[in-house]
């Protein structure tokens, strides 16, 4: 068995890049140093922040909650609140809500659960069903991502939090980077820094990623050592995503060429720097004409999705009151929907026709 390079006790972690082996005690010290360096380098927090920790119930966000709670003992001005969005995914979310309740009460941390069902009127499962029925071209992760971000920001502001901390680790970030390269979406890449959001908007809550420079392997070990790791825990909708493939590819690369993940992170930071110099990603933040939340467009994505799902209906009078740019967005999206619907009906008719013909 490998021995700790610092003290000779049994090692629980070996860095494939430097070859350094660490025991439990020295791993935790290394982890703490690394995260504190990120916090300092990117000025993630202020001495008197109310920090909302976005908790998904998974190992990374629970580790972040645990870590920041521990660190907060040394920063008396901090207040920590755990914020969990319950999308309503059967067989997955019920369990993670219980898990947060358990961890939060053990740590003595306040927590708030925000439910899709209460805020939007429907669970994610139901939304996915409606989208299928209406033939909307979005994957479950689109609804989940848009509504989660929307509700996190809204709720964090309502509880008076100055900043939202998320448990994204280095692996998550470079996966998103790769996915945005595939999509050729440089605006999104420009927003992948450790502090996100261009937003100078009174309703926007700053978002930070303290595990930005920590490998997923390391957050996993931290979770195991603190009792948050309970094996494989993937959202049941994950297999619909490209992320799955990108993640596998990056792990294979790292296996063959240790250090690749850090190089990709460096590449991302350089890209963000160049994009910022070009003014990309710093677009004007508007205010959604319908709900008043910060938005990149005249109507925010959450409201647009609600309209397309038919769970937000605007009366002709209300529509007439909206600014022209917002009205145009809604009208063109509804037209697109009608056109798509007509096409779908046509396709169904044709395929039935073929079936009938085949049965003769
Ligand atoms: Zn040691
Ligand atoms: Zn809106």
Image: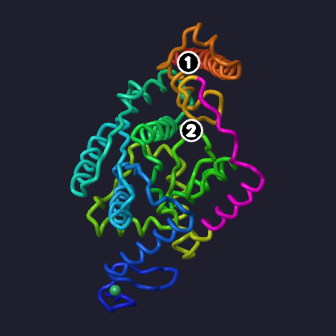
Residue position for label 2 = 202
Q: Which disc, if any, is residue 274?
A: none
- Name which of mark 1 and mark 2 comes first in the sequence: 2
Residue position for label 1 = 348
The residues colored magenta run 264-289
In depth, the one of 241 and 127 nearer the eye is 127
Q: Position of residue 3 (x, y in %)?
A: 34, 89
Q: Is residue 11 above or below residue 49?
A: below
Residue 318 sits inside the magenta stretch: no
The N terminus - image quarter: bottom left
Q: Residues within 10 Å of mark 2 (few under 14, many from 20)?
A: few
Q: Is residue 72 above or below residue 354?
A: below
- Taking the spot 39% from the left edge, 27% from the top edge, the residue there is 126
SS for dot 1: helix
SS for dot 2: loop
Ligand 1 sits in quadrant: bottom left
- Taking the spot 38% from the left edge, 90% from the top edge, the residue there is 6
């Amino acid at each position: 068995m490998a021995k700790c390079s610092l003290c000779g006790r049994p090692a629980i972690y070996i860095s494939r890049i430097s070859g350094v082996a660490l025991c439990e005690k020295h791993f935790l010290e290394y982890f703490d140093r690394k995260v504190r360096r990120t916090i300092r380098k990117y000025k993630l927090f202020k001495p008197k922040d109310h920090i909302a920790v976005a908790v998904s119930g998974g190992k990374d966000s629970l580790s972040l909650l645990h870590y920041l709670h521990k660190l907060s003992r040394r920063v008396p001005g901090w207040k920590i609140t755990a914020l969990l969005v319950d999308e309503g995914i059967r067989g997955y979310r019920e369990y993670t809500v219980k898990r947060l309740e358990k961890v939060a009460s053990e740590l003595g941390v306040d927590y708030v659960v925000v439910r899709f069902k209460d805020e939007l009127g429907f669970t994610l499962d139901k939304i996915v069903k409606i989208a299928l029925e209406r033939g909307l071209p979005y994957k479950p992760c689109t609804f989940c991502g848009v509504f989660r971000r929307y509700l996190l920001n809204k709720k964090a502001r309502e509880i008076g939090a100055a900043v939202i901390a998320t448990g994204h680790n280095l692996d998550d970030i470079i996966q998103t980077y790769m996915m945005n390269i595939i999509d050729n979406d440089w605006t999104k890449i420009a927003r992948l820094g450790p502090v996100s959001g261009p937003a100078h908007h009174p309703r926007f809550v700053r978002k930070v990623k303290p595990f930005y420079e920590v490998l997923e392997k390391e957050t996993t070990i931290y979770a195991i050592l603190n009792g948050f790791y309970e094996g494989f825990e993937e959202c049941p909708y994950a297999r619909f995503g490209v992320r799955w493939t990108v993640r596998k590819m990056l792990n294979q690369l790292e296996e063959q060429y240790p250090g690749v993940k850090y190089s990709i992170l460096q590449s991302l930071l350089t890209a963000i720097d160049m994009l910022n110099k070009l003014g990309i990603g710093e677009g004007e933040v508007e205010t959604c004409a319908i709900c008043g939340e910060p938005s990149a467009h005249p109507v925010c994505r959450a409201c647009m999705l609600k309209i397309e799902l038919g769970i937000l209906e605007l009366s002709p009078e209300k529509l007439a009151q909206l600014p022209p740019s917002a009205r145009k967005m809604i009208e063109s999206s509804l037209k697109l929907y009608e056109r798509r619907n007509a096409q779908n009906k046509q396709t169904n008719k044709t395929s039935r026709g073929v079936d009938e013909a085949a049965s003769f």
